[in-house]
Image (cartoon, rainbow, N blue to C red):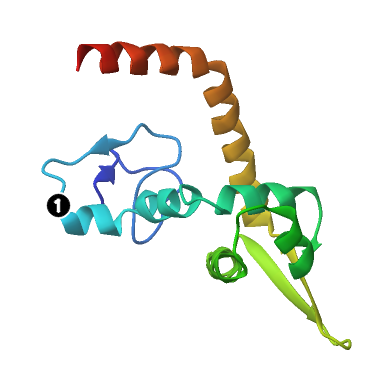
């Protein structure tokens, strides 16, 4: 059972995780390591919480990009990490990769429909962060002063 389980299970459901999309989610107690690892939100938060995925999703939300374009577009992102992040995003179905048979071969990356739906949520999260930035800074300063 996932740690994020609704109290009741009607509506849209996943075979592995019967949480309804429209219901509030409760956390089962105790939360075991297996519960945490099996929760679909855990994997998603790891993906969007890494250093480069949100940046690449934002770039690809605008238009398709070639590999070299992406490489030039993000300072501080090594080619090795770019390849790794693109592969992970492709594996999760958030981006697509198309290899054009030319000399040399040209690879293009694009956001999938699934990636666009996640991008919409990331935009909302980013807007929340901007609106509440001052409150977060005040809370951090208060906490740091008390510690």
Between 11 and 142, the one nearer to me in the picture: 142
Instruction: State left or right for residue 11 relative to residue 93.
Output: left
Residue for point 26% across, 12% down:
145
Residue for point 88% across, 88% down:
103
| Name of the residue lying farthest toward the right | 102
Residue 45: where, in percent of width, then height?
42, 48
Local secondary structure at mark 1: loop
Residue for point 68% across, 53% down:
74
Instruction: State left or right for residue 75 relative to residue 33.
Output: right
Task: Place residue 126 in its image quadrant.
Answer: top right
Residue 54: where, in percent of width, then height?
58, 48
Between 139 and 26, the one nearer to me in the picture: 139
* Quarter of the image with the N terminus in it: bottom left
108 lies above or below 131: below
Residue for point 45% across, 35% down:
22
Count of marks placed on residues: 1
Instruction: State left or right for residue 10 relative to residue 119.
Output: left
Residue 147: where, in percent of width, then height?
19, 18
Instruction: State left or right for residue 120 relative to residue 146.
Output: right
- Evaluate whether residue 66 shows in this view: no
Residue 43: where, in percent of width, then height?
39, 56
Q: Residues within 10 Å of mark 1 (few under 14, many from 20)?
A: few
Residue under label 1, please give it. 32
């Amino acid at each position: 059972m996932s740690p994020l389980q609704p109290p009741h299970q009607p509506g849209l459901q996943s075979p592995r995780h019967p949480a309804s999309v429209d219901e509030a989610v409760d956390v089962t107690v105790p939360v075991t390591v297996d519960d945490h690892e099996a929760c679909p939100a855990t994997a998603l938060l790891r993906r969007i919480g890494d250093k480069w995925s949100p940046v690449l999703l934002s770039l690809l939300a605008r238009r398709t990009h070639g590999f070299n374009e992406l490489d030039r577009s993000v300072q501080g992102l090594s080619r090795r990490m770019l390849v790794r992040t693109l592969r992970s995003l492709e594996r999760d179905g958030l981006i697509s990769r198309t290899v054009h048979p030319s000399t040399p071969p040209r690879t293009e990356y694009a956001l999938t429909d699934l990636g666009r739906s996640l991008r919409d949520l990331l935009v909302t999260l980013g807007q929340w962060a901007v609106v509440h930035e001052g409150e977060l800074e005040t809370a951090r300063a208060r906490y740091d002063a008390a510690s």
